[in-house]
Amino acid sequence: MRGLLLLLIAGFALSAELSGLGDFFRRTGYVVDFVGEEVVLDLGRGRAYQGEIFRVLKKGRELVHPQTGEKLGTLEEEVGTLEIAEVRDRFSTARVLEDRGIERGDRVRLSVGSVCYVGSEEGFYRVSSFVEDLKKGEDCDYVIRELEKGYGVEYRRKAVAFFEKPSPEAPPREVRELDFRLRARFLMTFPRLPLSADLCDFTGEGSRYLTVLFGDRLVIYEMLGEETVEFATYRLPSGFPVSLQCADLGEGTDLVLVNMVAGDSASSLLLRVKEGVPVVVEEGIPFLMSVLDRENPRKSFVGQRFDARNLWGEVRSLSLTEGRLKVGESFPAPPDFRIDSATARGDLLLFVDRHGFLRAFRGEELLFSAEGFSGSYTTVELPDTYEGEDHYVFNPRIAFLREEGGVLFAVVRNVSSPVHRFLGVTKFSEGELHLLLVDERGKVELKKVEGKKFEEAIQSAVPTGEGSILVLTG
C-alpha cells in the first residue's frame, strides 16, 4: 500500500518522555527580528513561556586541538539577556534586559537558573539523569513535581508543562537488551508511488511541511495536527527523480535538494519555496546532493557524481553563495561510498555501499558492517549498465534519531521476494525498520524493530523530532 504512517517506537520512546523533560531545560532558538524595543524569537507556543529568561549567544571562533587538529567545538560569546513578554503560535516577543550587540540570527538559550524536585527518591534519581543540578525542595525558578502519571513542571509557581512517566515495563536503553515494538497510526494514502520524503521548514519559524517526491512531481503537504493538507506542487523536469532532502543552507529557511538522473548522468536541482510557491534556485546540477549532518548543514553539504559508465564517482564539498551553487574541494569519502543512503553525525558516517552492505565509520575506522540493506522501488533506467539489468536501484536515506547514551539511527531494510526476482521484476515482500546504536566506545548494536509489518517496501523513514517516525511505503 502506498501510504504514510506515523510510528511510535516503544523502545525508542522509553526514554523519550524523560529525555523530553531534559530537552525542556535545553531549549534554544534564534533572534529573527526587532519590533520597537522588543526582540522577536522563533520560539512559539510550547517552546517558550511568559517571564522566562534567555541568553543571547553569538558564534565565535572554532577550537582546534593543536596536536591532533581535531575540531573540539565553537566558542560562543554571550551578548545579551532577554525576558519573554508574549508567546504566539509560531514566535514570541521578548524584552531586552541586557544588550551588548544583539543581532538577527543570534542563537538564544534558556537561562535555567535553579531547578527543584518534589516527589519520591526513585523519581529524583531518575529525573537527575536528565536534568542537571537538580535539587530537592520548592525554592527554585523551576519546580518538577512527581504526579501519578508523570512529571509536571512549574515556572515561578505557574504550571507550564507535563511529561508522562515511562511505562513500568519499559526496558533499559541499551539496544542489545531492547525488544523494540511499534505502535503505528495510519495517516494517509498516496495516489502514486512515493520515492522519497522529508519534513521541511519553509518559514524559519519551526513550521512542518511534509515534502514528498513522486515520479513526475514534488508535492508539499502541510501538517495540521491530525490532518495533512496539500499545500503546493512542483512539476519536475524530464528525467528520473531519485531522492529529496530539505536543509537550511544559510538562508534561514529550508531549501529542497531534489536529486535526479537525466539521460545517463545526475542532473539535480535546488528549490526554494517563496510565498507558498516552489521556485528553482539552480538546475542541471551534475551531482546527487546531500546534507550529511543536520547539525552542520553547510559544512556537510556534499555532492557525488553519478553516471551510467562509472556509476558512483567523486564526492565534492558544495556551498550556496549569493544564491549560486559553488563546487568546492574533494570530500574524503570511504571506499564504495554511495551518497543516496548516507547520513553523518559528528565523526560518524553511515551508508549502504555499492554491494548492499550497511557500513558505519568513525573517521577512517570501519566500526560495523552488515549485508542485505540495499533496495527500494526508486529506480532509474540505465540499460545494460548494472549486471545486465535495465534499472538501477537506489536506497532509502538512513535517519539520525537522537544522541543520548550513544548515537541512534533508523535504517531501512527491504526484503526481496524470491518469486518476483526470479521473474525478472524488482519486487519486495516486506520492509523492515532497524535501529543502530553507536556508543561512546564505538561499539555498534543493530536491532530490528518488531510489532508492525510493512507490506512490500519502505520508501522513506523521516524522524519528526518528537519520538516518532513518519514512514512512507510503496
Image (cartoon, rainbow, N blue to C red):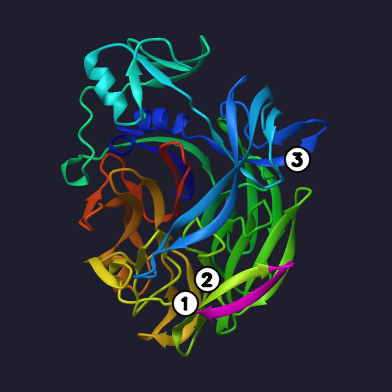
**Separation of disc 1 and disc 3 at Cα?**
36 Å
- Which callout, 1 or 3, points at the residue further toward the start of the chain? 3
Horizontal and vertical percent position of residue 327: 61, 78
| CB atoms of marks 2 and 1 within 8 Å | yes
Which of the image's four quarters has the C terminus? bottom left
Against 321, is 78 above or below?
above
- At horizontal 23% and vertical 38% (from top left) the residue drawn is 173
Residue at (25, 23) in percent of width and height: 125
Q: Quadrant of residue 88?
A: top right
**Which residue, given by chain and number where applicable, does mark 3 sit on?**
33
Q: Nearer the viewer, residue 392 or 104?
A: 104
Which residue is more in the foreground, 446 or 235? 446
Q: Could you tell me which secondary element the residue under label 2 belongs to?
A: strand
Measured as percent of width and height from the top left, residue 150 is found at 36, 17
Q: Is residue 463 above or below residue 128?
A: below
Marked residue nearer the N-terminal end (2 or 3): 3
**Which residue corresponds to the image point at 40% horizontal and 52% vertical from the top-left?**
400
Residue that badge 1 annotates: 331
243 magenta-colored: no
Q: Which residues are magenta?
A: 321-331
Q: Position of residue 314 (x, y in %)?
A: 47, 83
Q: Which mark is residue 290?
A: none
Seen in the image, is 407 located left or right of residue 460?
left
* Number of dots carrying numbers: 3
Residue 379 lies, in percent from the top left, at 47, 71
In the picture, the disc for residue 302 is 2
